[in-house]
Amino acid sequence: MYDIKALYEAESVEDAIRLLQEHPQAQIIAGGSDVLVQIREGKRAGVELVSIYGIDALRGVCYDEEGAIRIGSLTSFSHIAADPIIREQIPVLGEAVSLVGGPQIRNIGTIGGNTCNGVTSADSASTLFAWDAIVELTGPEGIRHLPIREFYIKAGVVDLKPAEVQTAILIPKSSYEGYFGNYIKYAMREAMDIANLGCSVNVALSEDRKVIRDARIAYGVAGPVPMRTPSAEALAKGQELSEETIGKVARAVLQDIHPRDSWRAAKAFREHIAVEIAKRALRQSILLGGGVIRE
Amino acid sequence: MSKQYKLIRCRINGKEREAMIDVRASLTDLLRNDFRLTSVKKGCEVGECGACNVLINGECFNSCIYLAIWADGKDILTLEGLEGPDGELSDIQQAFIDEAAVQCGFCTPGAIMSAVEILNEGRELSDEEIRIRMSGHLCRCTGYENIFRAVKKTMLARLAAAEKNK
């Protein structure tokens, strides 16, 4: 038995908002692979919960009217990885979420939960930062949209107002069209492990495929929340495809990231890995885009 | 606060079931305590070891971190659901025995249910895919190699049988 004080089941988003207004102390539970574990650890013992897990309207991937990819917040990692739209347009997101936990966790874990818990190591988060994802939040006052970079406030805290529910994650057409991406997770084990560092890159090449038109580089565990690397990205723009460019851009990420020492890994080690995985992810993204890299 | 209960109806191992459950229960609690399905093991109870793995609507879930109330309306399969009408073992269970993929046996029911999810796809998975799909189970006895062999062998045998029956 879990130490739960009371549990309210929402049947729709409106229902969830109403329940959250009626029970302001209550916390939202989606798939529960974080919340239930925290209750078990005693951290949230005696909690009141509003379960949104039964709201099927929040599941699935589709295009919206403007061609943005709309991912329902309760879509499980395994369903994201298998989805035809994701595989065609942003396969890197499917690859990234296939590195979360193990198979059973990927069946219960949701992309909404992965972002709402505000953790820097979330495998989906750095890739969503790289794609300039938009978070859709539905609350008593209606729907608002927020760039994912503004959604994260600090470690473990996201911009979720009272009685608000994250209902979707959107990837605008301008973010994905013409871009190719790669995600590298650095962890001790290949399954059931949390990233020491994660780097997600996507690149758009010029028409002749000789120059980097745009690059977006994002990290998890390189700071208290997932982050982008503006200095490295500015440097990459307009550069010719060469090993020299890749090396230069990858080293520039050190101006932007600020990882820390923890029991998982030392700061110096994380910085070393950050440069190396940026190189590899850049190289792979360029190759996926059909670019040829000069030695 | 007084105890909170919910009436749930679901299908467990092919049979329609009904239970009045405490909302604080996990699906592991429901399966073990209400239906005596003790193949569903209580291992880590935080979703890491895979000993409590069951199929829900054909997909694998660690039942320890799945609220029992969510089972309402679902189709659940545990290891007990694999046995034949006279208690015969299924092919995948027999393969685990033949390949010595069982030692202490604690992880076995959960691991077999992941194998069932794979086998139900009815296609040939690469060695790498099988390893990834079985990676949500911790086994401290076998070193995993025998488990891998049992799954692969059963997959190939079923595909050969399906080919023959075409």
Image (tube, coloured by chain):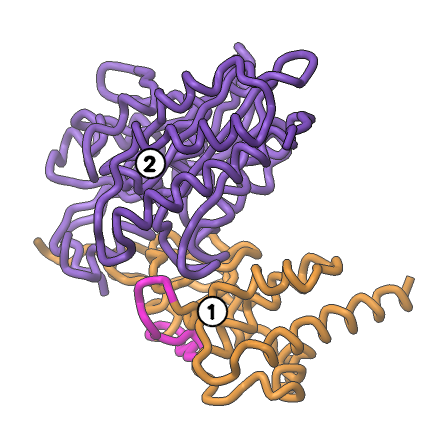
- Label 1: few (<14), some (14–19) or many (≥20) C-alpha neighbours in 10 Å: many
Bounds of the magenta segment: B33-48
Residue A205 to residue A259: above or below: above
Mark 2 element type? helix
Residues under labels 2 and 1: Cα distance?
A: 26 Å
Q: Which chain is orange?
A: B
Left/right placement of residue B19 relative to residue A178 reads left
Residue B103 to residue B148: above or below: below
Q: Please tell me in which quadrant of the rendered image residue A178 appears.
A: top right
Image point 26% across, 41% down: which residue?
A: A259
Image point 57% across, 32% down: which residue?
A: A243
- Label 2: few (<14), some (14–19) or many (≥20) C-alpha neighbours in 10 Å: many
Q: What color was chain A assigned in the picture?
A: purple
Q: Position of residue A251 (x, y in %)?
A: 40, 33
Q: Callout 1: residue from which chain?
A: B
Left/right placement of residue B136 relative to residue A27 reads right
Q: Nearer the viewer, residue A115 or A178?
A: A178
Q: Position of residue A133 (x, y in %)?
A: 41, 23
Which quadrant of the rendered structure holds the C terminus of chain A? Answer: top right
